[in-house]
Amino acid sequence: MLRTFIALEISQDTRNKLLNIIGTLQEMETSRSIRWVDPEKIHLTIKFLGDIQPGRIVDIVSALDEISVKIEPFQFALQGLGCFPNPRNARVLWVGLGLKESGSLYQLHTYVEKALEKAGYPAENKPYHPHLTLARIKNPLGTEKITAMLDRFQSFKTEESISRIVFMQSELKPSGSVYTPLHFSVLDGKNSTIR
């Protein structure tokens, strides 16, 4: 079985900016309750598939390649910090996205959900909330600390360009997750419905 997900990669320039944010936040809060994400592993998840049989790779790749001709390369803004589920009981710190629900990212997500549902992978039963995870928190830090961390970067904003979808394998190891691309589907928008 292979543990897999579908994602979008971010640029090295954005990774460097996130590294600076993480470094500042680490100075603000040194608690061992926080597990920071390696900026080189940060990505935007479109759909987590979990464990799949290796024989299913061909079907998934085919679905992603069909989707890629429906979406043109696009841009979105990374904007501000937030947390899940709330500052009082924060478990995840993230960078949000400034975009409209009618945008290309949401269209891409919809295409992926529909195509993979036909292939036997259930659609998510909750709204899609795109974000880049910066840290996971084991024990609540308190509303005041979390709010201070979020406020520090509320004005953060940068643009990101997307030109391909990545079908990724995730291996869980003692040192952390190791991500290996299994396939890239290049967005060319030949059959795009978004202009």
Image: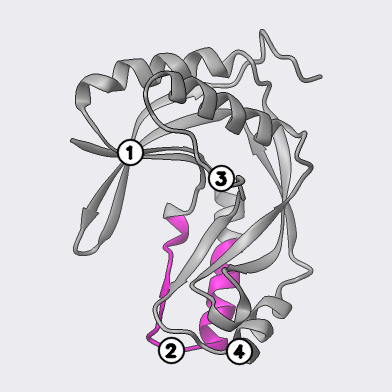
Q: Classify the position of the N terminus by image quarter.
A: top left
What is the CA distance from the residue labelled 1 to the residue labelled 2?
31 Å
Q: According to the image, label 1 marks what residue?
A: 4
Inspect the image, locate mark 3, and give the three-letter code of the amino acid beneath it. Answer: Ile
Q: Which residue is mark 2?
A: 31
Q: Are marks 1 and 4 in contact (CB under 8 Å)?
A: no
Amino acid under disc 4: Lys
Q: CA distance from mark 4 to mark 3?
A: 28 Å
Mark 1 or 2: the one toward you: 1
In this rendering, the answer to whether 171 lies above or below 93 is above
Q: Camera-side residue: 36 or 19?
A: 36
Place residue 175 in its image quadrant: bottom left
Q: Are marks 1 and 2 in contact (CB under 8 Å)?
A: no
Measuring from the top left, give residue 117's x and y in whole percent: 45, 25
Disc 1 or 4, which lies upstream in sequence?
1
Query: Dot 4, crowdedness within 10 Å: few (<14), some or many (≥20)?
Result: some
Q: Would you say the residues marked 2 and 4 are in contact, meaning their CB atoms lie under 8 Å apart?
A: no
Q: Which residue is mark 4?
A: 145
* Residue drawn at (75%, 59%) of the image: 157
The tag on residue 10 is 3
What's drawn in magenta, residue-wise? Answer: 18-40
Identify the residue at horizontal 57%, vertical 45% (top origin): 11
Quadrant assignment for the C terminus: top right
User: Residue flagged by tag 2: what amino acid is it?
Assistant: Ser
Locate residue 177, reporting x and y percent.
29, 55
* Mark 1 → mark 3, Cα distance in angstroms: 18 Å
Q: Give how far apart the Cα atoms at labels 2 and 3 are.
A: 28 Å
